[in-house]
Each structure stands twice: as C-alpha cells, then as structure tokens.
Amino acid sequence: MTQDNATSLASRDDAAQVLCIGSVLWDIIGRCPAEMRRGSDMPGRITRLPGGVAMNIAMTLARFGLKPNLLSAVGRDPEGDELIAACAHLGCRTDHIYRSEDLPTDRYMAVEGGNGLIAAIADAHSLEAAGDKILRPLMDGTLGSREAPYQGAIALDGNLTLSLLAEIASDPAFSKANLHVAPASPGKAERLRPFLNATRGTLYVNLEEAGLLCQTTFTNSEQAAVALIARGAARVLVTDGGASASEASVAGDAITQHPPRVSVARVTGAGDTFMAAHIAAEARGEDRQAALACALQAAATYVSGDSPL
C-alpha cells in the first residue's frame, strides 16, 4: 500500500468515528398499547435494554455504518459489566468509558401508553458525579488535548452538568470538533445555554425545549429555529413531533419538512434516532434537504416500531 493510499484510508476511518459523550445506562421501559392517564394500572410489556441519549445515538450511528466511540461513566457492578458487553455487541466502542468502583450504573425508567410518554425518571447521578473524568481521553492526548484538539464529530447530550457543558463549549480541547448537542429532556434544556452564548455546535431540540431556551412558546418548528439563531445559536434542528422539523443556521435560511405519517408504537429514543441519522447523512455528504429528510424517515421508522433499535 502506498503512503497516499494509507493516508486516504486513515482519513476515511477518522471521518467514520463519532465520539458519543453522555449517558450510557439501562433503559427500563413499560409500554401499554391503550391510552393511559395519571394513576392508570394497565397490562403491557416491560423491557430492559441499553439506553441513554449517548448510547441511543451510538447504536443508530453503528447501524448507519459509522464507528461510535462512547465517553461516559459506567459502574463496575454486575449491571455495568453486562452493559459494557451489550455495547460491544451493538458495535459501540467502550474502551474510553470511565469505570467507577464506587458509583452504580445509571438507569432510566419510562412508562408509555398509546397516547405517548406518560412519565419518565432519569437516574444519571453517576454520570454527573463522575464529572470531567469522562473527558480525560480528550485532554491527555489519547484522543486529543488542548494543544492538539480532537477534530472529528462529537455527539453530546445534556445529561452532563451545566458546568461541564459550559467547559466543553469554551475549552480549546473542543475548538476544532464538529459538535452536535441534544438536551436529553425538556427538564435539561437550559443546560444548552452555554452553546448559545458561545455560538458553538449544532443543537437538536424539540419545540418545548426551544421554547424553554428562548423563554417563550412557539407554534411551529421554523419559528423556533429562527428564534434560536437570533438568540445566538450557530445552527439548530427543531422537531415538532409528527407535524414538522426545521433546520436553520447563521449561514442560511431555515428549511422545513414534514415527517412521514406512521402509527406510533414507541416514543422513547425517537429524538436520539433523528439526531444520529442526521449526523450519518451529513457524514455521507448529503445536502441540507437530504440530511433532514433522512433524519425524519429514520425517526418515523423508529416510532413505528420497525427499527431494530
């Protein structure tokens, strides 16, 4: 193999790698096909599977042929060992995950009915407690450093603490990374504010999260996307369930598309699937319209229950 060919292959390999930083945990999901309300006690199915925003994104990236590399905190308890093995089976690298001796493996619990998500609790306290330990590979030269910043794509989730997200938004070690950021939930939307203040990264939010960041309410995704750019965002993608999704940036006007109509079988993880599919489409060189269409189709397929994730 010539030097030029070896360099070309290495470049393609680097381009295929995406660092997924954030929650890697067990999802415990109870699903009932009937509509539910507060206090409902219904028959259904309860599943446990690898989850967390970073993990959901990584699993989808792997399905699209990319090479997700997880940076997170996982306990050295039996649940953690099982989770690490499951990650490897799903094509997600875990060799840079921080394994804590005294912190338990995190968990997420949700209840879904035929009318959507009823309630959820995210127990990501170990990830928050680990703090900047999960970022060591990007600081000590393993994957990058302040002197030689990591230059690839990073998918980042808002389960990290506000102080740590603020550090990522401004630290030189991340200055050359292609940042893609999601808040994880409406309750953590405010944690994305450092990226507005620094005009950094691509933000993926739903209509409610956009409203929380702008301290108002919006009637559609395009209105929200334009408002977030005005607030300082470099680039945003705003979803509004089955109604629409919009992308806008400081470099161009907003574009809006409507997702395919499907029967809803599940909702937990749909936003993560949307984000991962969009990252993968751009990695293939798709333009704005094609990348947004790909993300909407992937999310619709996931929500319908046809996706293996």
Image: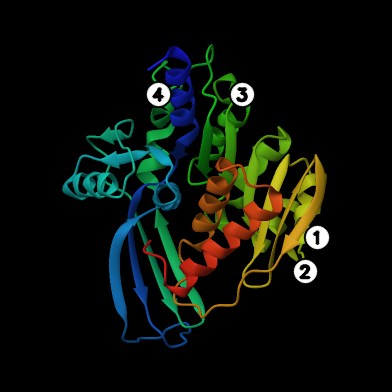
Q: What residue type is disc 3 on? A: Ser
Q: What residue type is disc 4 on? A: Pro
Q: Is residue 137 above or below residue 306?
A: above
Mark 1 residue element: helix
The one of 3 and 41 positioned closer to us in this rendering: 3
Q: CA distance from mark 2 to mark 1?
A: 7 Å
Q: What residue type is disc 2 on? A: Thr
Mark 3 residue element: loop
Q: CA distance from mark 3 to mark 1?
A: 29 Å
**Which residue carries the number 1 mark?**
223
The one of 84 and 15 positioned closer to us in this rendering: 15
Q: Which quadrant holds residue 49?
A: bottom left
Residue at the spot 77% in from the left edge and 56% down from the top edge: 255
Residue at the spot 25% in from the left edge and 44% down from the top edge: 84
Q: Is residue 101 above or below residue 188?
A: above
Closer to us: mark 2 or mark 3? 3
Q: Which mark is residue 20?
A: none
**Which residue carries the number 2 mark?**
219
Residue 44: x %, y % from top left? 32, 82
Q: Which mark is residue 137?
A: 4
Residue at the spot 64% in from the left edge and 46% down from the top edge: 203
Horizontally, residue 293 falls left or right of residue 6, namely right
Total number of numbered discs in the rendering: 4
**Which residue carries the number 3 mark?**
175
Q: Earlier in the sequence, mark 2 or mark 3?
A: 3
Q: Is residue 115 above or below residue 123?
A: below
Mark 4 residue element: helix
Q: CA distance from mark 2 to mark 3?
A: 34 Å
Q: What residue type is disc 1 on? A: Gln
Which quarter of the figure is the N terminus placed in? top left
